[in-house]
Amino acid sequence: MYEKPKILPEGDKAVLVEFGNEISEECNDKVMALYGFLKEKNIKGIISLVPTYRSLLIKYEPLTIPYKEITSKIENMLSSIDKSSYKNAKVIEIPVVYGDEFGPDLEFVASYNKLTPEEVIEIHTKPLYRIYMLGFTMGFAYLGGMSEKIATPRLERPREKIPAGSVGIADKQTGIYPIESPGGWRLIGQTPVKIYDPKNERPILLEAGNYLKFVRIAKEEFYKIREEVNNGKFNVKTYDYAN
Amino acid sequence: MEVFKVLNPGLFTTIQDMGRYGYEHQGVPTSGAADEFSFKIANILLENPENCPALEITMMGPHLEALNKTFISVTGAQIPVYLNGNLVPNWSVIPVKKGDTITFGQLKSGCRAYLAVKGGFEGDFKMGSFSTYTRGNIGGYMGRRLLKDDILKAKETNIECKLVKVRDEYIPKYPSFMEVRVILGPQDDYFEKEMIDKFLSSEYTISKDSDRMGLRLEGPEIKAKKHDIITDGLVPGAVQVPANGKPIVMLKDAQTTGGYVKIATLISPDLDRLAQLKPGDRIKFKAVTVEEAHKILAQTEEKIRIIKETAVPLNYYNIKVKGKEYFSIVEVL
């Protein structure tokens, strides 16, 4: 982490506040704190905010709020931010069916790490994964906290089509594909929940700053939940994150 | 109100407004008109609110059949517009009757034109915007580009509209070579000074692998101390430099975050002009300060105001001379 955050222009309509050059909870806490603070203040001329691992991008309308004013406002806030926004973090439970046609690489991930598939599932469902940021594609969450015991390199040759909801591992990362897309992650399972649903009033399920827990379900349950999801009758389980 | 039937959709025609803001933290690209300046003027001519959804036309225009009386305007790329086969002016209000056809000729300069309709097009309104984002299948016309036989609707209004045209001197030109202004950063410190100089003194050609997401450039390679960064926020106009050293300028469908180092970011008025470039066209970058960029932005807003105030009244006539009908347009001086 930097001793003093950097405030850098990104073109004529955005500033980037960079807290460090690392992926760490400490650094991301700072990002989320400034993000929470700015959301709360709702400053006229600030159009949108993009929190990432180690920086916050602030888009603004320069003819409404001049550059000098926005940077001085940020400077002021930086001296008074705390972890307040983290007190309201939620945990979202994502049901996943592991293995077989839902997770064709589960066996590989197990043998690569000299484990049994059961052990891989146990290790994968254990942590509360922090949602560091969303990006890359609509609704894609960058999760932190996966055990290195199940880290596996990407496929040498990416698959052309991966179904939406696929849960995969790429090196030390784990994640869920929000939409059907090509990709090189090792697939270990699939969730029936729609991470991105353009038909939904809230099309994107996950939010940066929250936590995610994978919960193992059986095949029959997958089909049952999927039907409920399609009928708009399924609600994901969420609860408060206890610090 | 149904306004048009799509007889031929053109190459890539989508409904756009000024974009989708406030969902970038969930990975939702802003999308929106690639050339906001032309988009705004198209609406201003029709006395619409600036942000009314309009068609963004790419290189080849659609063929439309009017299903009701309305008014349209076409701005942006110089592409001939025909009303029932008669050439009508771009950057002007065009009256349309039920049964009329609108067709387009061959593109002369620029890349993207905007067709606005009185009252604005209707469409899927998702996350605060009508803009089509085809990769996410949202907004505009069912989240996709127009197809043959689509029926376009406009908001029902009490249709009357002054016939006006933008003065010729205010119509932008889209040369195949242009200088675009950038603000260096946010990661210019990843580059040695010679590399920054090389970036600012070289000419780049727009590659054919370019779309609404970004323009890939061919030209002198720019090397960074490190090309990968910890993924952070990205705006349209950002110039990313991946490990092959070939810059990519992000456009409106750009993803919200990126992992390549950003040497510079285009100022927004120049991003509008850049969006009018085609594969094979060339650019050169010029660095300006944030303060200079904001002056240019204020001047652009002022220019829009002047365009609005100085529009020339226009009249369209069908004249009969010796039993033969002629179509004519008269500018009122």
Image (tube, helix red, strand yellow):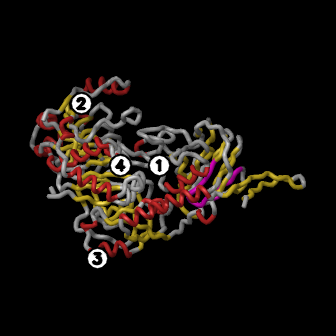
Residue A28 appears in view: no
- How far apart in space, not on screen, are marks 2 and 1 (Cα)? 38 Å
The residue singled out by tag 3 in the image is: B194
- How far apart in space, not on screen, are marks 4 and 1 (Cα)? 16 Å
A4 part of magenta stretch? no
- How far apart in space, not on screen, are marks 3 and 1 (Cα)? 37 Å
B82 part of magenta stretch? yes
- How far apart in space, not on screen, are marks 4 and 3 (Cα)? 36 Å
Residue B298 appears in view: yes
Q: Which mark is residue B18?
A: 1
In the displayed structure, B263 sits above or below B102; it is: below
Q: Earlier in the sequence, mark 3 or mark 1?
A: 1
Q: Residue at x 33, y 71 (%)?
A: B221
The residue singled out by tag 4 in the image is: A46
The residue singled out by tag 2 in the image is: A95
| Residue B135 in the image, given as x and y percentages of width and height | 41, 46
- Looking at the rendered structure, the kind of residue marked 1 is Met
- How far apart in space, not on screen, are marks 2 and 3 (Cα)? 53 Å
